Amino acid sequence: MDTNPCNIPVKVGFSVPSRVSRMTKPDATLVNICGVQVGGSGVVVIAGPCAVESREQLFETARAVKAGGARILRGGAFKPRSSPYNFQGMGEEGLKLLSEVSKETGLPVVTEVMDTRKVELVAKYADMLQVGSRNMQNYPLLKEVGMSRKPVLLKRGMMATIEEFLLAAEYILNQGNEQVILCERGIRTFETSTRNTLDLSAVPMLKRLSHLPVIVDPSHGTGLRWMVPAMAKAAVAVGADGLIMEVHYKPEEAICDGYQSLSLNEFAQLMTDLKKIARAVGREIS
Ligand code: PEP
Ligand code: MN
């Protein structure tokens, strides 16, 4: 059985950048978000709304995902929207709510930063900085989050190859920040029935090539609420170190990404099912 992937070079047609490479560092990197470890034997679930919309929405959703077993809360305060006329996020007001709800629930929070000029501000409130798909190749931003001492959740660019993804992570490590989680969130293909094509083969590939933890976002990966549970279970089965999922207390009223957000009940049910999958592959939902 292949028990030691790090010592088996894979022929991938490119050389893996050195700091992120398993060849340089055979042991898995553990990313620590206020005491929650990602990259160890446990599978960590990150859940919450796409965007922070209101105090009630955030607090109700946060309490429910915590009760269901999520370890980290997600929620965007600065949203990358395709249309400039769509809701852009609550900004600093949203960050303040995130930090408040974090204190109440004890859940660390991850939120997106899109602008180098906002890294300091977002880092003041957040426990982990998210670099979104659209900014995976924003090199000044990668350098800036690399200089911050916060863990970074780096999402795969929707048109990025594995090589480009690893090179983007290398930018962050190069600045001295090794606390980086890679997130597969779906790529653009010719397929139109789903929002993106969730590339689950990226998980074993990235884990083999790199020592960094790998998590999966089945919400943006599919764009379809009903499909999220199936792909979340599949992600755990292929070896993901965690999941990030959109959950909303009233998905039909969500301002952003409601059609791919799980309801509170759906999330609770999924967590029960995920425990069984994790156990079957020798892990646990931590
Ligand atoms: C998000 O997580 O809300 C988001 C915008 O994700 P992505 O950057 O993967 O599209
Ligand atoms: Mn979203």
Image (cartoon, rainbow, N blue to C red):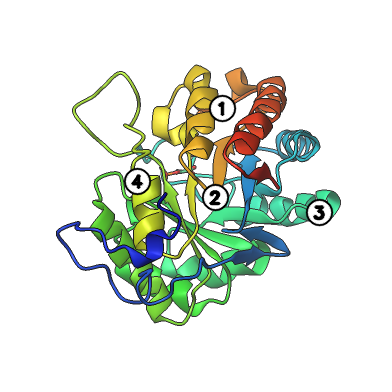
Point 49% across, 74% down: residue: 178
Secondary element at image label 1: loop
Specify few, some or many for label 1: CA neighbours under 10 Å numbering under 14, 14-19, or 20 or more.
Answer: many
Residue assigned mark 4: 202
Q: In the image as oriented, which residue stretches furthest toward the right?
A: 104
Secondary element at image label 2: loop
Residue type at mark 4? Ala
Measured as percent of width and height from the top left, residue 65 is found at 73, 36
Residue type at mark 3? Gly
Mark 4 and mark 1: Cα distance apart in space: 23 Å
Tags 1 and 3 touching, CB below 8 Å? no
Q: Quadrant of residue 33?
A: bottom right
| Disc on the earlier residue, 4 or 3 | 3
- Report whether 5 appears left or right of 54: left
Point 46% across, 82% down: residue: 176
Secondary element at image label 4: helix
Measured as percent of width and height from the top left, residue 157 is found at 32, 50
Q: Can the viewer see residue 138?
A: no
Point 76% across, 34% down: residue: 68
| Disc on the earlier residue, 4 or 1 | 4
Position of residue 53 relative to residue 192, above or below, is below
Specify few, some or many for label 3: CA neighbours under 10 Å numbering under 14, 14-19, or 20 or more.
Answer: some
Q: Quadrant of residue 17?
A: bottom left
Point 35% across, 71% down: residue: 170
Mark 4 and mark 3: Cα distance apart in space: 32 Å
Residue 106's disc number: 3
Mark 3 and mark 2: Cα distance apart in space: 21 Å
| Disc on the earlier residue, 1 or 3 | 3
Which mark lies nearer to you, 3 or 2?
A: 2
Residue assigned mark 1: 261
